[in-house]
Image (cartoon, rainbow, N blue to C red):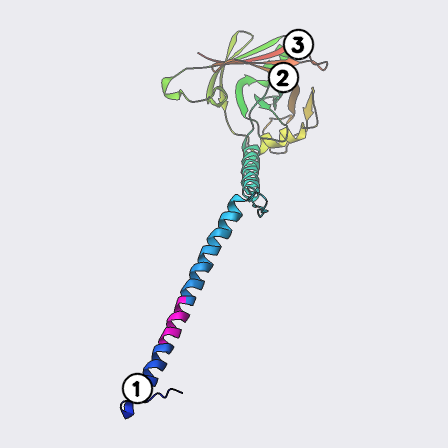
Amino acid sequence: MKSITAKTPHDSSFSFSRRYFHWNRKVEEQDDGEDILTFSFSSHASQEELKVYQLDPSVPTPPVFVKAPSRKLSAVAVSKLRSALTIFGKSRSHSQAGLGTRVVGTLFGYRRGHVHLAFQEDPKLSPPFLVELATPTSVLIREMASGLVRIALECDKKTEKKGLKLLEEPIWRTFCNGKKCGYAVRREPGPEDWKVLKAVGPVSMGAGVLPASGNGAGGSDGKLMYMRAKFERVVGSKDSEAFYMMNPDGHGGPELSIYLLRV
């Protein structure tokens, strides 16, 4: 048996310590290498799996959810638009409505007063066109008895009134069956006008007498006469319009025609 002896007392302990620490360092290096190798292998494996996941058609791909365009925003926008149009329509109807091809015309006035002429699209709405003629009511009644009445209202065409609509002209020259009958003035309906228009509202066509209002405006008799009918409106241009009274069967009649001209 071969004996191993140390040259110095410290050789054995030094050799043992060196061997021990050298071995321990090798173990730590191996452990670190294994850690590094393990980490590298894991990273490499993840990349391989990713390649297989991307390229292999046999590997099921997860469903891709595409968010459909939300209709909530468009619905809110449509709702706001409808609300705005409704508010606009209400504000317009409460003020004044335009005139279409079929309108309701009303001539009224006290027997000893002047004739008022109003055109309405809807009897419940304010008339877009209301003028007070200089023609006395008694004269109009006499002309109506002849069976044919033509009333012409003329106004001047001026450059400073270029954007003014024909129905908005304030002053008109009046002609009744070719005879000049003074001037007509456009105005907004007052309480007395509204009282008359509401009283004859249920009447679609006809003539009659309303009782006196009690303020003495109609003279000694105080009777207010009216005639109400449907008219066909014909627009020739921005400077000419005509209103033809219609018979109950819907056809135009020659009894009453009203012309608006800007010359």
Task: Check disc 2 and report the residue beneath it.
Answer: 231
Q: In this picture, is 47 found above or below 95?
A: below
Rendered residue at 27%/91% (across/down): 8
Q: Count neighbours of disc 3 (C-alpha within 10 A) and say few if under 14, some if 14 to 19, many if 20 or more.
A: some
Q: In this picture, is 98 found above or below 153?
A: below
Q: Quadrant of residue 147?
A: top right
Find the distance from the CA under tag 3 to the CA under tag 2. 10 Å
Amino acid under disc 3 = Gly
Q: Is residue 118 left or right of residue 172?
A: right
Q: In this picture, is 171 found above or below 56?
A: above
Q: Nearer the viewer, residue 257 or 250?
A: 250
Task: Check disc 1 and report the residue beneath it.
Answer: 14
Task: Using the rendered image of the protein, determine whether residue 166 is visible from the camera's viewpoint.
Answer: yes
Tell me the magenta residue range.
25-33
Rendered residue at 36%/18% (across/down): 159
The dot on residue 104 is none
Q: Count neighbours of disc 2 (C-alpha within 10 A) and say few if under 14, some if 14 to 19, many if 20 or more.
A: many
Q: Main secondary structure of the magenta part?
A: helix
